[in-house]
Amino acid sequence: MKTKNAVLTMLIVALCMMVSTRGFAQKEKLEIKIQTSAQCVMCKDRIEGAFAYETGIKNATLDLTTKILTVVYNPNKTDDKKIRLLLNNLGYDADDTKANQTAYDKLPACCKKPDASKKN
């Protein structure tokens, strides 16, 4: 009888641990939406490709219609400032932060903002 109770107690403890671990894992993901200066499919490929290899980034998807980049990330490994900085260093504006001018200048003509005659 004691063995059955011990096994039952261990199963309940294990189940509780699994449920609590699952809850913590879900909290390790945040989502941020960033308005970008992306213009074309090449921009989309460049941005999504760069974010695919970045530590802490779970997923990055650029909607070209709205120019909004949606990033799902682990806040224990990166943060919204680092994400915006990465986008800036690729040559794109990120919300109110401006693109790195050197990176912007290296973008293909199709990736530059329509008012490219003005300085970034």
Image (cartoon, rainbow, N blue to C red):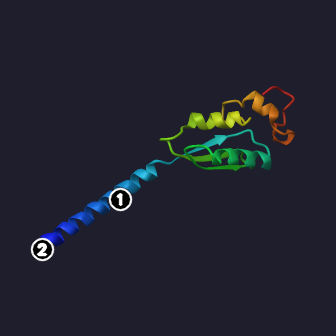
In which quadrant is the N terminus drawn?
bottom left
Q: What residue do we see at 74% from left, 49% from top?
A: 45
Name the kind of residue labelled 1 in the image: Val
Q: Position of residue 89 (x, y in %)?
A: 69, 33
Q: What residue do we see at 86% from left, 39% from top?
A: 109
Depicted 66 relative to depicted 6: above or below: above
Q: How many marks?
A: 2
Asked whether, in this view, residue 62 is left or right of residue 71, the answer is: right
Q: Which one is nearer the viewer's eye here, 63 or 24?
A: 24
Q: Which one is nearer the viewer's eye here, 1 or 108?
A: 1
Corner quadrant of residue 7 = bottom left
Q: What residue do we see at 70% from left, 30% from top?
A: 98
Q: Position of residue 49 (x, y in %)?
A: 69, 48
Q: What residue do we see at 16% from left, 69% from top?
A: 5
**Badge number at residue 110:** none
Q: Position of residue 90 (x, y in %)?
A: 72, 37
**Badge number at residue 1:** 2
Mark 1–mark 2 distance (CA, rounded to whole Å): 27 Å
1 vs 2, front mark: 2
Residue where numbered disc 1 is placed: 19
Mark 2, other Cα within 10 Å: few <14 / some 14–19 / many ≥20: few
Q: Are dots 1 and 2 in contact, CB under 8 Å?
A: no
